[in-house]
Image: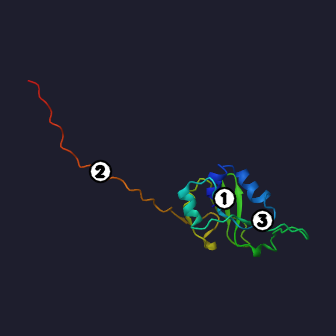
């Protein structure tokens, strides 16, 4: 969804995406929603939404107490981390992992990314499969016709 959001809703503007995800939700997100797919082509939206159409859920503001800040001592509460770079998303797969591989912003959002943390290692290929092929019906090719007779001049 982040790839589609970057490419469509935010028109390639990483700063605008970061502002939406971070500045406008300082407490963080409990889940991202299909509102990130606003502006995406219908077929892509349908594919990524997988039949659910719900906005993201932000954690509520904490009127008392310190803000939720994750550190090396509290990172065990997180499953995945994402760092937005100008050229792509760095995916950090497990607590204690310092770096992750980078998924370029130009990556097709329909690519199937694996969710096995051990596969997301720096210096390794992105654990993904190619996007599903779209099957467009095309008309059968017309049968080859015999060449037109050539006229001869005498």
Would you identify the image quadrant in which residue 81 lies? bottom right
In percent of the image, x 76 and y 75: which residue is there?
77
Residue 88 visible in the shown view: yes
Q: What residue would you read off at disc 3?
A: 28
Q: Indicate which disc, 3 or 2, sits on the residue closer to the N terminus.
A: 3
Q: Do the residues labelled 3 and 2 touch (CB within 8 Å)?
A: no
In percent of the image, x 64 and y 72: which residue is there?
117
Quadrant of the rendering where the C terminus is positioned: top left
In the rendered structure, the answer to whether residue 64 lies left or right of residue 36 reads right
Q: How far apart are marks 3 and 2 (CA)?
A: 55 Å
Mark 3 neighbour class, 10 Å CA radius: few under 14, some 14 to 19, many 20 or more: some
Pick the residue in front: 48 or 129.
48
Q: What residue would you read off at disc 1?
A: 36
Mark 1 neighbour class, 10 Å CA radius: few under 14, some 14 to 19, many 20 or more: many
Q: Are marks 3 and 1 in contact (CB under 8 Å)?
A: no
Q: What residue would you read off at disc 2?
A: 141
Q: Indicate which disc, 3 or 1, sits on the residue closer to the N terminus.
A: 3
Q: Is mark 2 on a helix, strand or loop?
A: loop
């Amino acid at each position: 969804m982040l790839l589609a959001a970057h490419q469509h809703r935010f028109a390639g503007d990483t700063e605008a995406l970061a502002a939406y995800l971070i500045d406008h939700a300082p407490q963080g997100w409990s889940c991202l929603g299909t509102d990130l797919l606003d502006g995406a082509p219908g077929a892509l939206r349908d594919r990524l939404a997988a039949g659910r159409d719900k906005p993201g859920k932000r954690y509520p503001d904490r009127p008392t107490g310190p803000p939720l800040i994750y550190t090396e001592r509290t990172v065990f509460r997180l499953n995945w981390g994402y760092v937005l770079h100008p050229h792509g998303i760095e995916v950090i797969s497990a607590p204690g992992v310092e770096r992750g591989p980078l998924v370029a912003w130009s990556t097709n959002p329909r690519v199937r990314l694996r969710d096995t943390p051990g596969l997301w290692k720096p210096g390794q290929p992105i654990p993904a499969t190619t996007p599903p092929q779209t099957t467009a019906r095309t008309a059968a090719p017309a049968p080859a016709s015999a060449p037109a007779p050539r006229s001869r001049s005498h």
